[in-house]
Image (cartoon, rainbow, N blue to C red):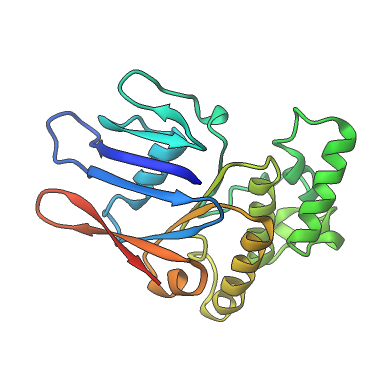
């Protein structure tokens, strides 16, 4: 089953400007972890913003779990797309402890459901003993795990990750990479990760796309790992 389908996606910040993305098409199957490789300016973070609904494309379409979320006639708001997002800086709420950060997006669940989901997420990311701690009391790797737990808690159809290791030192990256893949696979999560580091993709992803930059447009090329 294709969980994410992108067809002919085109985007520029101003009409008449050179497109940042031009005629981008790809699909991701359920449970796949797919990497998007590209240097700064190649459009990889813009691609995530278009999929999540933070930007509106000039052309093309996006479908999530078989349902269109954007095309020439339709634009579904970000909160209704079934998309989870882990930002480059993790974006944890500094005034909330770990428990409340994870519970933040679960308002539609009953109290019992929220408690059960919280416990499931803490166990999944191996942070059960840290529920009362605040973000500033956690290491970079621990903050990343909590950001991941918060994004997974509402059970999104697709998880998007923007340069998830950029804030970690080299030694920590190696251990966190394999740990992250295990967490995503255990959750059965469909995931797309953008990064400039091929080692991230080789350690975590089932296959990859590269956004290559030329004088006119950025195009997608695919590679199995």
The answer to whether residue 71 is above or below residue 127 is: above
Closer to us: 7 or 162: 7
Q: Residue at x 21, y 52 (%)?
A: 219
Residue 75 vertical placement versus 184 (above, below): above
Residues 84 and 142: in front is 84
The image quadrant where one finds the C terminus is bottom left
Residue 72 is left or right of residue 146, and the answer is left
Q: Residue at x 55, y 74 (%)?
A: 173
Q: Residue 131: give x, y in percent of width and height.
A: 83, 54
Q: Is residue 12 left or right of residue 178?
A: left
Residue lying farthest front? 1
Where does residue 224 sit, x and y in percent of width and height?
37, 68
Q: Residue furthest left?
A: 215
- Image coordinates of residue 132 in percent, x first then y, are 85, 53
Of 17 and 180, nearer the camera is 180
Q: Residue furthest top?
A: 73
- Give the quadrant of residue 41: bottom left
Residue lying at 25% horizontally and 34% vertically, measured from the top left: 13
């Amino acid at each position: 089953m294709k969980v994410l389908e992108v067809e002919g996606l085109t985007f520029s910040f101003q009409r008449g400007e050179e497109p940042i993305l031009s005629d981008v098409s790809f699909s991701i199957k359920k449970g796949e972890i797919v990497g998007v490789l590209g240097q700064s300016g190649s459009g990889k973070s813009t691609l995530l913003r278009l999929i999540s609904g933070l930007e509106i494309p000039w052309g093309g379409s996006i479908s999530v779990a078989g349902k269109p979320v954007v095309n020439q006639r339709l634009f579904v708001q970000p909160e209704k797309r079934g998309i989870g997002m882990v930002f480059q800086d993790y974006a944890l709420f500094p005034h909330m402890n770990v428990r409340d950060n994870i519970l933040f997006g679960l308002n539609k669940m009953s109290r019992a459901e929220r408690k059960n989901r919280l416990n499931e997420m803490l166990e999944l990311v191996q942070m059960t003993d840290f529920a009362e701690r605040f973000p500033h009391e956690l290491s970079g790797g621990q903050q990343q795990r909590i950001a991941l737990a918060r994004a997974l808690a509402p059970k999104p159809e697709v998880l998007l990750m923007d340069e998830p290791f950029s804030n970690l030192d080299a030694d920590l990256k190696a251990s966190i990479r394999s740990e992250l893949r295990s967490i995503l696979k255990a959750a059965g999560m469909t995931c797309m990760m953008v990064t400039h580091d091929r080692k991230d993709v080789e350690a975590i992803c089932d296959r990859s796309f590269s956004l290559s930059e030329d004088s006119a447009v950025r195009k997608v090329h695919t590679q199995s790992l």
